Image (tube, rainbow, N blue to C red):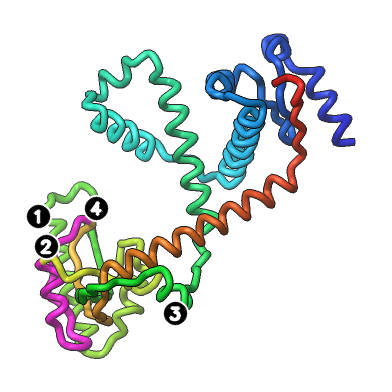
Amino acid sequence: MRRFFLLLLLFSLNISIAANTIVAVVNEDVITLDSIEWQLSFANSYDEKIDIVSRQIDLLLQLNAVNELSIEPENNEINGALTQLAQNNNYSISKLKSHPQFILLVEQIIETLSVIKLEQFITKDFKPELSENEILQNCRNEKPTRIKQIKIAQIIVSEILDSSSSKSEQKNAVVGFLEKLSKHISKGASFEAIAKLHSQHPSYYNGGLSEWLFVNTPNIEIIDSLQDGKVSKIYETDGGWAIAIKVDERNIDPDIETCKEQIKSQKSQKYYLEWLKELRESAYIEIYTDKL
């Protein structure tokens, strides 16, 4: 039945598509020769052409998955990538937009961001563990250095009053609110519970807990000096005003930690490629090799 549907699909394509040679069918989509003509122009062998078609199949499957999961890139992400592209090439945004290939550039950026977001989504709960043997074999350091890191928990509040309030009024209201919260915590209230209830930062869901931080900014240095359970003074962040406590500390070798993150990244990428392989195996794919 699926085969019949695909044949019906191919025969019912509009004239402009029908005039273009179809080189592959992927579920209910097709890949045409025109869509990969530029890539094929660099191929020096039949195997390279097949590899190009295969990569296009993987891309199409991933873009369809992005659409199904509703994780398409936001406009601010696309604009940010365009800004970075312009800076990297010493272009202004207006000059970049006047480029004859601008629409193609935007399409490529959207595709790239889409695949990145899909990989992040698929691997978000994947937490690879490293054995001591893996670390010893891959992350040797003849001259280790030790640098301090700490974990903190923060309650960050950006606004209390409505948007019609002035910046100074908003600040005074937020500071007053944080002072009340600080007093409650100092009297024994749970910092984690209050953070989950009142923090306006995305970290609220885990009680305001941060990742490991290097002690290399004035605010972090002050928090590092706090006694256990002591609440910091109110300080300003990019996301608003905050109070914090010191949760944990450690001394690490940054080169070893970088190496460990690289191994985890490789494991994460392997996990994603296995997922993509399963996605491909579950799809209907037909390549018309005689068209290449």
Residue matched to label 3: 132
Q: What stretch is highlighted in magenta?
A: 218-238
The mark closer to the camera, 3 or 1, is: 3
Q: Are circles 2 and 1 on residues that touch, CB within 8 Å?
A: yes
Callout 3, which amino acid? Glu
Callout 2, which amino acid? Asn
Q: What element carries label 4?
A: loop
Q: What element carries label 3?
A: helix
Q: Are circles 4 and 2 on residues that touch, CB within 8 Å?
A: no
Residue matched to label 4: 162
Residue at 36% from the left image edge and 72% from the top image edge: 196
Q: How far apart are marks 3 and 2 (CA)?
A: 51 Å
Q: Distance between the residues labelled 4 and 1?
A: 13 Å
**Among the 4 quarters of the image, the one containing residue 19:** top right
Q: Is mark 1 on a helix, strand or loop?
A: helix
Residue at 45% from the left image edge and 22% from the top image edge: 104
Residue matched to label 1: 168
Q: How far apart are marks 2 and 1 (CA)?
A: 6 Å
Q: Distance between the residues labelled 4 and 2?
A: 13 Å
Q: Earlier in the sequence, mark 4 or mark 2?
A: 4
Q: Is mark 2 on a helix, strand or loop?
A: helix
The mark closer to the camera, 3 or 2, is: 3
